[in-house]
Image: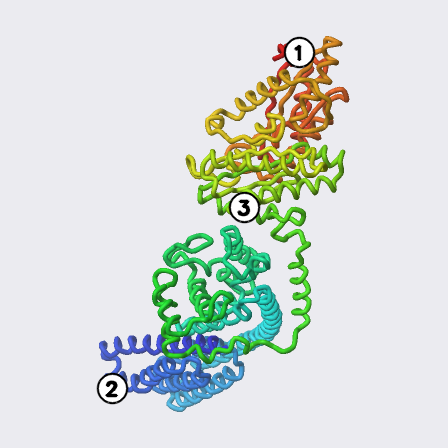
Amino acid sequence: MDLHIRKINRNLVIGWLAIVGSLFVAYIGEVIKEERSLQYLLAYLLVAGMPALAAVWIYRKKPEWYGLRYYIIFGYFFLYLFSILTEPADLVFTYIIPLLFLLVLYHQPRLILYTGVASLAVNLIRVCLRFVHGEITKANSWNSEIQLGVLVLCFFGAYMAARLYDQINHENISYTRALDEKNNQIQLMTLQTVTTIVNTIDAKDEYTKGHSRRVSEYAGALARELKMPEEKIREVEVAALLHDIGKIGVPDAVLNKPGKLTDTEYELMKQHTTIGGEILKDIRMIPGIDIGAKYHHEWYDGTGYPRGLKGEEIPFVARIIAVADTYDAMTSTRVYRRYLDDAKVIREIKGGIGKQFDPVPGEAMVRLLEEGRLENISPDRNKSGEESEIERILNRFLEEQRNPTRENQAFDELTGVYNKSHGEELLKAAVDQRQGVLCLFDLDRFRLINETIGYVTGDVYLRVVADTIRELSEELIISRVSGAEFVVLIRNAVTQAAAEELFELFQKKIAEKKAEDATLEKLSVSIGAVMLGYGELQSFHELFRKADKALYYAKQQGGGAYSFHEEEEEAAGEQDMAEVDLQQLVHNIKGKESYRGGFQVAYPEFARIYEYVKNIVERNNQQVQILLFTVVAKNGIHVSVEERDRVMEYLERAIIQSIRTVDVTTKYSSTQRIVLLMALSEERTHIVTERIMKEFYRMYDRGEVLVRCNTADLSKLESV
């Protein structure tokens, strides 16, 4: 409201000055032409100019003064009276019209009414005086009648406009008040929610009780020291209050570990900044609420995380919170050390200015500490003794979110390794260091094991494999990415020879456990690997794809083997590689001895299918066509593991719907599938291939992948 009054006062003062100035210029011209005297001009300046200048001075001192409007009206009307009494021109009565237009801004109808009555009275007096002096007669009185009629019409129009404006203004004020009240209620609920979240965060970390509240208080004190507007100070306090919200996604075992964190645990802890930013990014009630959570661990010199921002690249709010957060960490007692005294804290902060801290908030914190102005801060001063309904509901919800049986936990419930989402985040960050080996461990024939031995035994196999992988090294990250597949980064295996030793050790341990436990008889694990640190920097997904490629080469050896991705193989095109795969497949099948097995299994068992088919073909002298379907991503498109699996399901469905009951299909790799067509000519084979392709693209329309097909006639090939 004060801002509204200030704007109106400013417009009135400017309007008054414009009118006074215009008349002053006109009068100077008349003085030059000797139509007016210099004494008249000086009298005009005294009567009109001095009050106008006084209005400017008053406005500069008290721009929101409500009484300024009355002073302006009185001063302007005094000018009008002076002009009426001294100006011989008939149009002098129009001088009041600019004031009328300005009065409408006040939307006060009574003010216009009083001014109008006074103006009419002055003009009537002037008309009467001119009538007495003989200047106006019955013959020429029409001019004065029009003058009075125009005044009445102008004042009536201004009066009605002011009433309408006043009505609209009151309605707007009522609406604004109702809206403000609603916003206040929403903001109160938001703050209650924020308080509950903060309490939940602090409850997770038993070593940092009250940390979020204290950081909020310290950040607010810094913002005030830096003379930030009150609205911005509040935003800083709320952002600071939620700066550690991402710790909700950090396992309690890591968060409350009393000893030093391992590299893997530290990587997981660092994720709380990214998690917090994702949680808060869509909250619009408080601007920039996610900034503190995302960037409070960025360092001024660019060595922080998660993005390594430097200097002015870091949002200023986050730079303030970083100082407050570090101060509270240093002045709080932790399990591994006592709190630091103020003298040492000041030395530490001074030493971090320009490195960890922005000099502006860093030096402000030093001033507050040296002058003892942080001593009166009470971090619990806003804490209510009563828990609101929204707090109770949110507390229950957050407690459920922390339940370790939920799907969004950090670890796979069955094996105890990282689940896919958390593991992938850690692996993405870790592969950027370009050290170690990224490998895929996949249980051979796992679906057949589940179907023939039982899912309980399958679960045992998974736990045994996970435990055995963990025994290889302390410097590894392991994540379960699908039913029978684990992706592992072993950091201390910096050469292929070192990685091979670990793989040999793994297979040895698996053999020992199989010898000790008869139920593990069918346990077999294939490994595909790619070494980091060679060639150009590659993304996690690109490395994963290469390890997956190496994995199915390992599976071609019959299971229980390992293979490394070779860069020279990657130089060939995808189509050429598929042709190489097909030739290798035919070579392996023709060279295998007969043995009994099942049908719907992965590639290591494919030769068993072929033996059955080959016997039929040889007896009936029929043709056998082998088709290798390969799924490849289009250029520049990254296909996630989930999308890849979905595409392979579509391909399998398209094949099954398109082939006959006598034909055979099986999975060859994570991106390839094989089909054996019995007693079909090349022309009919082409028709079946087209039908499979058409059916696949009917089901899959995202356009991220292509399906390629390579064929060979097995009946025309000599046995190896």
Closer to the N terminus: mark 2 or mark 1?
2
Name the foreground residue: 232 vs 181.
Answer: 232
Disc marking residue 715 = 1
Mark 2 secondary-structure assignment = helix
Give the residue type that dot 3 points to: Ile
Colour theme: rainbow
Residue on which the image places disc 3: 477
Task: Check disc 1 and give the amino acid type.
Answer: Ser
**In the image, what residue occupies the spot 47% across and 43% down?**
492
Closer to viewer: mark 1 or mark 3: 3
Residue lying at 57% horizontally and 37% vertically, measured from the top left = 506
Frontmost of labels 2 and 1 is 1
Across and down, in percent, residue 421 comes to: 59, 47
Q: Quadrant of residue 174?
A: bottom right
User: In which quarter of the view is residue 397 placed?
Assistant: bottom right
The residue wearing badge 2 is: 39
